[in-house]
Image: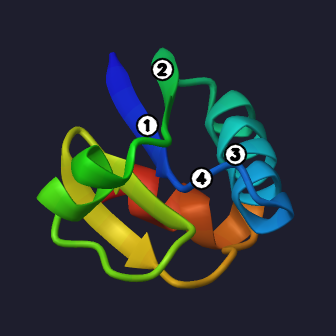
Amino acid sequence: MKKIQILGTGCPKCTKLAENAEKAARELGIDFELVKVSEIDEITAFGVMSTPALAVDGEVKLAGRVASPGDIKKMLES
């Protein structure tokens, strides 16, 4: 099971990134858990300074922008 973490305070961009990540994972047919990380201390523990950010299995794959479902699929497959 992949753990997909959305790092952000709940802004509209964070919400959109979460939607795109869920769509990408469903389209790939993978078993996943989507977790929203909204506490600033937890976000900075990842080394992320700009949100929204996306982490897969604890590894930051993207920060500071909203990726498309297609881009997220590539991140989930690697």
Q: Is residue 33 left or right of residue 61?
A: right
Q: Amino acid at mark 4?
A: Thr
Q: Is residue 20 left or right of residue 50?
A: right
CA–CA distance between discs 1 and 4? Answer: 16 Å
CA–CA distance between discs 1 and 3? Answer: 9 Å
Q: Using the image, determine if residue 38 lies above or below residue 40.
A: above
Q: Amino acid at mark 1?
A: Ile
| Residue placed under numbered mark 4 in the picture | 9
Q: Which label was assigned to residue 32?
A: 2
CA–CA distance between discs 2 and 4? Answer: 21 Å
Q: Are marks 1 and 2 in contact (CB under 8 Å)?
A: yes
Query: Which callout, 1 or 4, points at the residue further toward the start of the chain?
Result: 1
| Secondary structure under the numbered disc 1 in the rendered image | strand
Query: Which quarter shows the C terminus?
Result: bottom left
Q: Using the image, determine if residue 42 lies above or below residue 75.
A: above
Q: Are marks 3 and 2 in contact (CB under 8 Å)?
A: no
Q: Amino acid at mark 2?
A: Phe
Disc 3 crowd rating (10 Å Cα; few below 14, some 14-19, many 20+) is many
Residue at x 70% of width, y 67% of height: 70
Query: Which quarter shows the N terminus?
Result: top left
Q: Which label was assigned to residue 18?
A: 3
Residue at x 40% of width, y 42% of height: 39
